[in-house]
Amino acid sequence: MPKVLLCRTLDRSEMKNLIKGAIGIIGILILPGCQSINQILPALSPPTTLAKQPPAASSVAAQSTATTQMEAQVLQQINAIRAKQGLGQLRSNEKLTQVARNYSRRMAEQNFFSHTSPAGDTMVQRVRSAGIFYVTIGENLFTCTNIPQPVPASVKGWMNSPGHRKNILRPEYQETGIGVWRRGDTYYFTQLFLRSLSL
């Protein structure tokens, strides 16, 4: 049965961790949704030791031609939805794709499904560790087992969930990274959304 991670706002301890890691930043605004966060210059703040650093994502190759095609299909379907709403198309960001792909692989290999990994790293830490600068970022997750068409199931699941839908239709997002990983008959999808920092 497919699973779309329930949307939530960041809890008090996550908010504290973000604030501690944001010394010298102009301001922080936490938005509700499926891990959607606005920050100003987040990667310029001093590193924190609140959680282990996630594994580097720079060397994560696509698992297979089939999963690469699925990543492209998700992007195509999401952009079609955005176009119908009069929104700009999301551009694929290779570094962000590496982060998304690496996280999907970790969920598959370690058998978990959460915005926070068992090691304690969050979306913010994973993106920051890849050296990606941004103003706004969001994350949607999906997993399914024994579903013949996982791509339409993922997009439909996200669109039927208010928080995930909000990430997909957020007008300020300009770029995305999509990572799909398969383990047996189970697929893990991670889609990251980004408005990059324009200097």
Image (cartoon, rainbow, N blue to C red):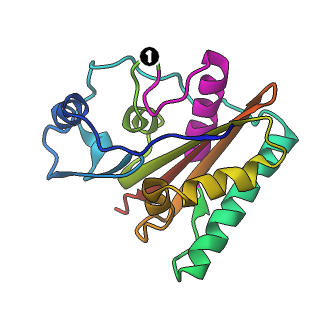
Q: Is residue 166 left or right of residue 188?
A: left
Image coords of residue 37 (percent x, y): 32, 50
Q: Secondary structure at mark 1?
A: loop
Residue 131 forms part of the magenta stretch = no
Is 104 placed above or below 184 here? Answer: below
Q: Quadrant of the C terminus?
A: bottom left
Image coords of residue 48 (percent x, y): 26, 24
Is 194 placed above or below 2 here? Answer: below
Please rate how many residues cluster around mark 1, counting C-alpha atoms within 10 Å: few if below 14, some from 14 to 19, many from 20.
few
- The residue under label 1 is which amino acid type? Ala
Kindly identify the residue that appears in the image at 17 percent across and 37 percent down. 19
Residue 105 forms part of the magenta stretch = yes
Kindly identify the residue that appears in the image at 55 percent across and 46 percent down. 96
Q: Determine the main secondary structure of the stretch shown in magenta.
A: helix
**Magenta highlight range:** 93-117
Note whether residue 58 is visible.
no
Note whether residue 127 is visible.
yes
Kindly identify the residue that appears in the image at 49 percent across and 65 percent down. 174
Of 166 and 135, the residue lying toward us: 166
Q: Quadrant of the N terminus?
A: top right
Q: Is residue 124 left or right of residue 188?
A: left
**Which residue is the site of mark 1?**
119
Kindly identify the residue that appears in the image at 43 percent across and 62 percent down. 166
Of 18 and 85, the residue lying toward us: 85
